[in-house]
Amino acid sequence: MTMVGWDIVRIRLGALPLRFSLLGSEINAFASWFEDGASSDRLKTVRIRVDDDGPTIDGDARSLPFGRWNRLWSFLIDLGVREFELDPRLESNQVVDVLALLFAERRALRSRRSRRETRPAKLLRSENGLAFACTMTRLDSGRLTVSYSYCMTRFSHLVRWFKERQTHLRDHRSLFRAAPRYAVLVGLGPMAVFLLYTVHESWWLLLVTSLLGSVFLCAATYLFFMTVGSVEYDNEEQAHTLKQAYGQLKQNADRIRSDMDRARVVQQRLLPDLRTLPLADRLDWAASFVPQEEVGGDYFDASLTSQGDMAVVFADVSGHGLGAALVTAIMKTTFESWLEQSGDLVGLVGLLNQRLFSLTPDQSFAAVTVGIYDALERTFSYCNCGHSPYPYLMSKGTGTPCPLDAAQALILGAVPEVQSRPATLHLQRGDTLFFSTDGITEAENDQGEQFGRERLEQYLAGTNGMPLSELVSGLVETVETFNRGCDQGDDRTVLALRVR
């Protein structure tokens, strides 16, 4: 709360003796020390503990000039102040003004009788405190708290009034263009004095007009500097507000980045370890997972069923980032739940669709390819639920990539039930199954051209006899080279297995 005009006049008059006293000198010295040294870091509140044993700042009295200001500490103790908290943004003149306020109201602050309590003293002890000298000052239970408070100056109001009235001068460009015109008008003032004297040849008229011109120029100069100072003051306040907002934003960004790093570690653990994938004595494995962000929406997994077969899941969840990564976690737990039930591919498709439809948002779905490899019969049964590009089979003899498009079903998570009918194919020694997400085929170059299925198939056709790890790493490098100079638009995941 603020004070009325009479209270301000009374405080100014009551504080006049400070200008000629040793206490006033100590207050000025303390305020200068505070602005130049104690609050130079501008980071945290300065807390000064005042008691009979001597003052301390944040519990430390070493290397501090407190011994010079005994009158100031005695004055505060006499008012019942035991702890003095100062905002680091406070300037020396604000500290002086607040202490002068306490000096002017010392009798009312010492008195415990309500009838002697003045309005400023009452506001100082109120819950919100007293708005004075662009501060919020509060005295409560021996603690004097002085916080910085922005207050618009009269000249700031003048600038605002000027902007509201002069609609043609709303930005810096219009002001720059108008400056010469207004400068010429002001410059004509002295010429008007000369013309008046030339016409009338009166020294008295010259004297009067010169005096009026001097008063006008003095007032204009004063207004100019005060207005510029008020604008600078407003700019400093805005800069401080932006700095605080930036600090809060950076803190939130750091926390989000930390959370994303932890999420990335968790998602890496959701993916299988290539060294421990099933049927390692009969199958070679290779894979690559490159998310667009720290985490992604691509997922693959492989594990043995209770019958000793190898089940594989390869999925591309809609979207990317943390939301898509959470969906992959649902798919991971669903796949492990299906393994415990010892079901078939139709059951796996149905269970995945049921979980995704019930647990994810309406616009969230997954393109999934599931399959089961029978190592004894060397058969691979699969079902493609909306996944593009198709998986490819590359036989050892020809190396030509053949898309597996015989068993197609709807994308999972879009409708309550999905009908699926798996297809089965026989594999030979050296045959390779290849899976990739659309982050590979939809990668764009700087001309907006996509990598596409044709380039993918051309690359695969030239990898006959190539070690599986080189096949995968070579494709990743080829796509990165094609995409060089452009942002990665989606997660890129590749999985390949080869019959030994």
Image: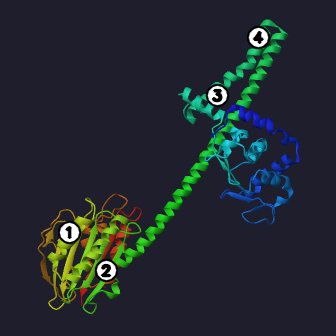
Q: Nearer the viewer, mark 2 or mark 4?
A: 4
Provide the secondary structure element on which disc 3 rests: helix
384 to the left or right of 71: left
Q: Is residue 384 above or below residue 37?
A: below
Residue drawn at x 40%, y 62% is 487
Mark 3–mark 4 Cα distance, whole angstroms, equals 25 Å
* Residue 180, disc: 3
* Visible residue check, residue 108: yes
> Residue 404: horizontal and vertical position, in percent?
17, 74
**Residue of label 1:** 354
Mark 3–mark 1 Cα distance, whole angstroms, equals 75 Å
Q: Mark 2 belongs to which amino acid? A: Leu
Precedes in sequence: disc 2 or disc 4: 4
> Residue 349: horizontal and vertical position, in percent?
18, 73
> Is 431 or 35 nearer to us in this picture?
35
**Residue of label 2:** 471
Q: Is residue 130 above or below residue 173?
A: below
284 to the left or right of 375: right
